[in-house]
Structures are given as C-alpha cells and as structure tokens.
Image (cartoon, rainbow, N blue to C red):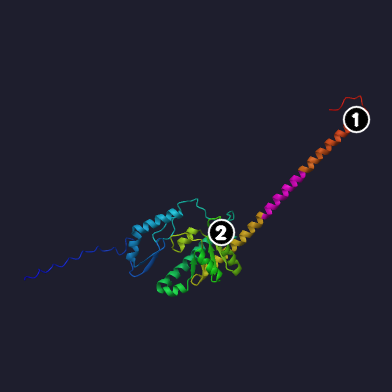
Amino acid sequence: GKGNPPKKPKKKKKQKKRDPTDGSGEKRKPGVARTCDVCDVTCSGDDAWFDHLKGKAHAKAERRVERDTGEGIGETGVGGAKPHNQNAPTFIGTDVSIRYADQVITPELNAVTTACVSELKRFQDRAYFKDQVKARMRRRLVFGLREVAKAVQLKKARAVVVAPNIEETNDAEGGLDDVVAKITAAARENGTPIVFALTRNKLGRIVGKRMRISALAILDQDGAVEQFREMLACAAAGRDAFRDEAEKKKDEAEKKAADAERASAKAEEAEFSGKDGENLGVQDTRRREESNPGAEPTP
C-alpha cells in the first residue's frame, strides 16, 4: 500500500525578545540567584527575577504586607517607603512603657539592629545557596520564640533581639508572656545580651518572612562584627537611660508623697489650732458670765 504522506514540520513560534534592561537601564545578568523578601521566593537569573516582580503573586503579597504593617514595599521587596499610618506606635523614647523591657529604644538602636540582622541574614542565605547542609550546621541566626529559647538555654546565643510589641496574654504557664519571661531570665542568667528593638512586623520583614516575629537569636556575628558591637553599645546606653528615668520617676514620686504629707500635717495643725481657739473663747465667755451673772450673754 501507499505510505502516508510525510508530515510537514511544525513551525516554531517566534518568541518575543525580552528587554535586556527591563526598561530600567540595568542589564540583566543570567544565573544570579535572588530572594524576594516579601514572597520568600528565590529566583535564578534576572529574567526570572523581573518576571516575578511583575507577577500577580508578588503584587498580592505586597498589598498584604502594606495592609498588615502600614508600610510601603520597594521594587526589591524591602521596606523603604513612607509609612501609610503616621500614628503607628514606634516604641521609641523614655515615655514608652514596655511591660517586659528594661531598656529605652532609640532610632539609632533600631537602625543599627536592622543593619546587623540584615547583614547576618544575607551571609546566612549566601551560605545556604552554596551548601545547605553546612549552612544548617552553622546558622548565624534563628528566629521564633521556641528556637530562641532553645538557643539561650544551650548557651549558643551571642545576643537576643526581642520586639517590644508582643501581645499581652492572660495565659498562665506556656503563654507568650511566660515564654518571653523565661527567655529573658535565662539570658540574664547566662550573661547573654538582650536587645529590645524594632517591632514584630519589622523583624519578620528583615528576615524575609511573611509573618510577625517576636524574637530572634544571633548565634554567630561573623560578617557583621562592627554592626553587632554598635547594636550592643546602643542597647547598653538604652538600659542606662531606663535606669536614669526610673530613678527620676522614683524621686518625683517620693517628693510628691513628702509634699502631700506636709500639706496634710499643716491642715491637721490648722484644724487643731482652730479648735483650741474656739475652746479658749468658750472658756472666756463662761468666766465673764460667772463673774457678772446679770449681764447679757456675749454672742
């Protein structure tokens, strides 16, 4: 029989040429791995990176972060725009009361803490991409209350960063307050520095997680030694400021109590003086009436 006629080869569809600069003037470099801090997604190569930034999933994640934190997200997935909520609490200054903190938070402390943690996270991610096994064995930082508590108990933590806005709970043992109290108590007992800085949202964003993080522990400051020292120095200055403010408030309270006591003593003295004068007047009237019985009584 006759064979089937040969099939015509399918024409390959012409692919659209990608803009090598993506309109930004920066030429794409293939093979460079980048991690989106908003989506926690790693892209290999600039083509995949720019496609991800233009995608719906990234845009949706940005809107969610903006809604949760009130802060804008830049093109690279890192916070930097002006906050939408200008009245958001910053926990900065001596007037702020943090129930579990013995330290004043300053803008300088927040800035150097951000720089330190960001740099350590960058080194940790780079080591992870090179060799995951070795990176897990030598982590520079861990986050989450359970991981931080474990690191502090095993004396592996070089420092602990705790957010100042952990929700207050009425739970007894095992609640957030109980866990935070145990972490801070163990850290003080071990001599591990505690840094109260930033917020839960900001800590989560720095480590590239789409969640709020209450605390993190620095296990190895190699690669950010200078930032680490500056962070500890700022935290120490904050503790000194906290003690000074506590002493000032104590002196003011004692002064108010002394003033109130003096005012009360004067009032009692005046009251007794008035009663004594009244009694003397009554006695004088009685003596006059007794000496002159026919006289009209003195009003």
Which percent across, then down, holds residue 258?
73, 50
Could you say which is closer to the camera, residue 102 or residue 244?
102
Q: Residue at x 88, y 34 (%)?
A: 283
Q: Residue at x 42, y 73 (%)?
A: 132
Could you say which is closer to the camera, residue 249 or residue 143?
143
Which percent across, then down, holds residue 204?
47, 61
Which residues fall within the magenta stretch? 250-266
Work out whether mark 2 precedes mark 1 in sequence or the reverse, and give the earlier one.
2
| Any part of residue 82 in sight | no
Q: CA distance from mark 2 to mark 1?
A: 77 Å
Amino acid residing under circle 1: Arg
Density class for disc 1 (Cα within 10 Å; few <14, some 14-19, many ≥20) is: few
Which disc is residue 86 wearing?
Answer: none
Quick one: which residue is furthest to the right in this view?
291
Report the residue marked by disc 2: 177
User: Dividing the picture into quarters, in which one does residue 22 lie?
Assistant: bottom left
Query: Vertical placement of 110 versus 253: above or below?
Result: below
Asked whether residue 24 is drawn in magenta, I would say: no
| Any part of residue 261 in sight | yes
Q: In the displayed structure, does residue 101 sit left or right of residue 5?
A: right
Amino acid residing under circle 2: Asp
Report the residue marked by disc 1: 288
> Is most of the magenta stretch helix, strand or loop?
helix
